[in-house]
Image: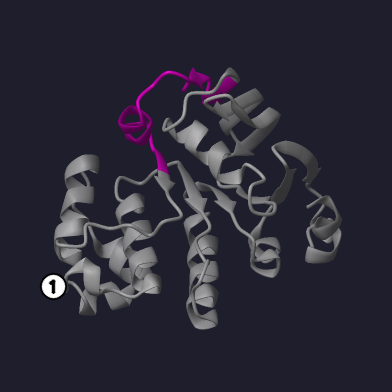
C-alpha cells in the first residue's frame, strides 16, 4: 500500500487580515501526480507556500509520513525531501548553470548531476552560461534540476508551464511522468489539457475553497474540471 507523503487537514491561511484559504483538506500518496487547478487568486500558490513552510497557516494541520510540518522552517522541510519550485522562475542570475546546480548539490548533499542532465540535456550545453541569460523554459529546467537533487519524495511545482512554448510544455509533461516513478508531485497549473493528461487526481479551488476532488480517471478532463473553477 502506498504511503501518504502529504496530508493537509482543515487548512486556513491568510496574508495579514486577508483570508486566502478556507478549510482545505488534501492528501497525496507516494508517486502520485496531483493537479491543483483554479483561476488566478484561487489560493493555489498559497497552498503550496503553506506546505513548503514559507507561510504559517492560521489553523489546520500539515503532515508528511506522520510528521507535523507546521512551524518548521522552509529549509527544514526541504531537508525532509519536500521541494518547492516557485512560479517566478527565479534563479541565481549572476551564477552559471553549473554554479546554480552546485548550490543545489551543497544543500542536498547530492553531487550526482546525471539524472538532471538526462532529463534536461540542454542544461549540459548551457552549463557555463550565466543563468540570467537563459530563456524562461531553460530557467524552468534549471529550477526543476536543482530541486530533484537529493532524490526528494515530494515536489511542489507552481505554474511550471506558464509562458512557455508548446514544445517545452510537451517535454516537461514527459519529465513529470518520469519523475513520478520515484516521487510524488503536486502541480499547480492552469493548462488544463496538460495537467489532466498526467494527473492521478485533481483538486479544484475557487476563491480559497476546495470545490472538487476528482479521482476517477475518465473524469480527469478539462471539460469535467472547468465548471468547478
- Residue 106, how many percent across, how many down? 16, 44
State left or right for residue 144 relative to residue 155.
Answer: left
- Left or right of 105? Residue 200 is right
What span is colored magenta in the figure? 61-83
Whether the magenta-drawn stretch holds residue 2 is answered as no
Q: Residue at x 38, y 58 (%)?
A: 144
Q: Nearer the viewer, residue 6 or 226?
A: 226
> According to the image, what is the colour scheme of the structure?
one colour
Q: Residue at x 15, y 66 (%)?
A: 96
Q: Is residue 98 left or right of residue 202?
A: left
Give 120 or 41, whichever is nearer the viewer: 41
- Residue at image point 72% right, 41% down: 207
Q: Is residue 210 above or below residue 56?
A: below
Q: Quadrant of residue 153?
A: top left
Instruction: Give the x, y percent position of residue 221.
Output: 79, 63
**Residue 4, how many percent across, how many down?**
59, 32
For the image shown, how many numbered marks are present on the structure? 1
Question: At which x and y percent is residue 2?
Answer: 61, 37
Q: Which residue is mark 1?
A: 128
- Quarter of the image for residue 19 reads top right
Occupied quadrant, residue 109: top left
Q: Nearer the viewer, residue 114 or 91?
A: 91
Q: Is residue 185 left or right of residue 142?
A: right
| Furthest-front residue in this view | 17
Q: Quadrant of the N terminus?
A: top right
- Evaluate whether residue 1 shows in this view: no
Task: Residue at 49%, 46% (x, y): give it.
Answer: 156
Element under disc 1: loop
Does residue 60 appear in the picture of this structure? yes
Q: Is residue 74 magenta?
A: yes
- Label 1 neighbourhood size at 10 Å, few (<14), some (14-19), many (20+)? few
Amino acid at each position: 500500500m502506498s504511503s501518504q507523503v502529504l496530508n493537509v487537514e482543515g487548512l486556513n491561511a491568510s496574508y495579514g487580515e486577508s483570508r486566502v484559504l478556507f478549510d482545505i483538506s488534501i492528501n497525496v500518496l507516494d508517486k502520485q501526480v496531483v493537479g491543483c487547478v483554479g483561476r488566478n487568486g484561487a489560493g493555489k500558490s498559497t497552498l503550496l507556500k503553506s506546505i513548503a513552510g514559507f507561510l504559517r497557516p492560521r489553523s489546520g494541520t500539515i503532515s508528511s509520513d506522520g510528521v507535523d510540518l507546521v512551524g518548521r522552517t522552509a529549509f527544514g522541510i526541504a531537508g525532509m525531501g519536500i521541494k518547492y519550485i516557485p512560479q517566478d522562475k527565479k534563479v541565481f542570475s549572476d551564477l552559471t548553470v553549473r554554479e546554480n546546480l552546485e548550490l543545489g548539490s551543497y544543500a542536498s548533499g547530492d553531487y550526482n548531476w546525471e539524472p538532471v542532465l538526462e532529463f534536461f540535456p540542454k542544461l549540459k550545453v548551457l552549463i557555463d552560461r550565466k543563468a540570467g541569460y537563459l530563456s524562461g523554459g531553460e530557467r524552468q529546467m534549471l529550477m526543476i534540476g536543482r530541486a530533484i537533487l537529493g532524490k526528494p519524495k515530494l515536489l511542489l511545482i507552481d505554474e511550471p508551464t506558464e509562458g512557455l512554448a508548446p514544445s517545452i510544455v510537451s517535454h516537461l509533461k514527459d519529465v513529470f511522468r518520469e519523475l513520478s516513478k520515484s516521487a510524488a508531485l503536486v502541480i499547480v497549473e492552469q493548462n488544463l489539457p496538460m495537467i489532466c493528461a498526467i494527473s492521478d487526481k485533481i483538486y479544484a479551488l475557487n476563491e480559497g475553497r476546495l470545490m472538487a476532488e476528482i479521482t476517477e480517471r475518465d473524469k480527469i478532463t478539462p471539460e469535467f474540471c472547468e465548471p468547478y473553477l
